[in-house]
Amino acid sequence: MAQYRRHGSIVDRLILLSDPERQDPSPGVGMGAGRLNRLLVLAERHGVLGPVLANLQRPDEPAAQAMFDAAVSRHNAAIGLCLMLRQMAVSVMDGVNAAGVPATIVKGPVFARHLYAKPSLRTYTDIDFLARGSGLDWVRDGLLARGLRSDGEIDPSAREWKFYSPDYPHMAIEVHSDLIHSRSLGTQLRLTYSDIVEGDDPDSVSAPAPLLTVAAVHGAAHQFDRLRQVTDIVQAARHLTDAADERRLQDIAEKTGTRFAIVAALNIAGHIYEDRRCHEIAQALGPIDRGNLIPRLISGTVVVAMQQRSRTIHTWRRSVLREMLKKDRSFAANSATRA
């Protein structure tokens, strides 16, 4: 777990407090209202307000108390949105399960339920369905039947389709055929329903190896622009504890070309939160090209800056990481082997 040295730094405090399993004394004690508000606003932007509030002690100063209580209210509102989204998702999945079509839910609610001690620690603003074949049509039709609207024409050749509620504009649902949307990245990487679902069991996506794969690829695909992506990776690594899970992770990484992305994500998360398990799994997966440079390329300071005005200073770092993902040769090598 992260044991950062300088509790006076907002970046260090945010990283310490956003660790869902942090056990050392709160570094938030003694913060004035202004600094506390800056910390809470940053936590909210990064999607880690839940663990930050859970790890902070409520301040004694009245002005700081007001900041803290306002953040609690905002977090409770975010939890309410999650409940609405989950209700919609459960309704669709009940139909999916009854019809027996290949579709499942990934990311937000799955991470919240399986990776965090309390689901309220991990909020989300959309629901992601991953499906193939008839499952794609079934989910899309099911969402339209429930009053959601498609974001434009439904292009069958796309990899992602977005739907919105006219009554709740902040509620979004996305349907994916592949969790790698970028055409440039997609020439090297893929992550489809068949890649992470074992047999015909859609619930198998909540096993440790698929959870870590999805978390790592999600963070890498977005070049780590939110701290929540990093906490998802750390939590997923902490839940992957036995050799069978490691072998399953290796199998998924090899057939999808995502080994570089997963190892890079583990190295970044392991350095930011100083998490031993992240480093162990990365080592088991094997070295990657320039792997020792990646944590310095995408540090905790860089990730936090992605939700600040200073983000433009670090744009080149994310561009370099993206080029490294595109140029990784593991997928091509594995494809040649399979052929």
Image: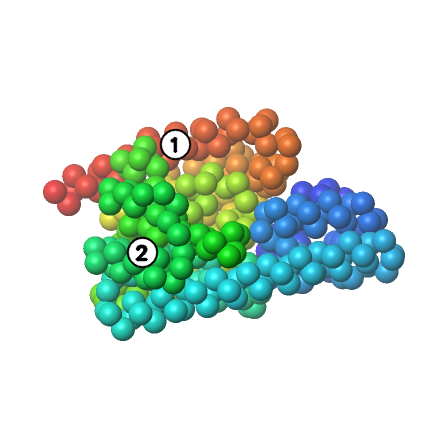
Residue 36 relative to residue 177: left or right: right
Mark 1: amino acid? Met
Residue drawn at x 87%, y 57% is 62
The kind of secondary structure element at disc 1 is helix
Q: Quadrant of the C terminus?
A: top left
Q: CA distance from mark 2 to mark 1?
A: 34 Å
Q: Quadrant of the N terminus?
A: bottom right
What residue would you read off at disc 2? 140
Residue 224 relative to residue 66: left or right: left
Residue drawn at x 61%, y 46% is 45
* Residue 334, picture quadrant: top left
State the image coordinates of residue 182 (x, y, percent, origin top left).
35, 37
Mark 2: amino acid? Arg
239 relative to 289, above or below: below
125 relative to 116, above or below: above
Q: Residues within 10 Å of mark 1 (few under 14, many from 20)?
A: some
| Colour pattern | rainbow
Q: Who comes first in sequence, dot 2 or dot 1?
A: 2
Residue drawn at x 31%, y 35% is 183
Foreground residue among 249 and 65: 65
State the image coordinates of residue 10 (x, y, percent, origin top left).
71, 43
What residue would you read off at disc 1? 324
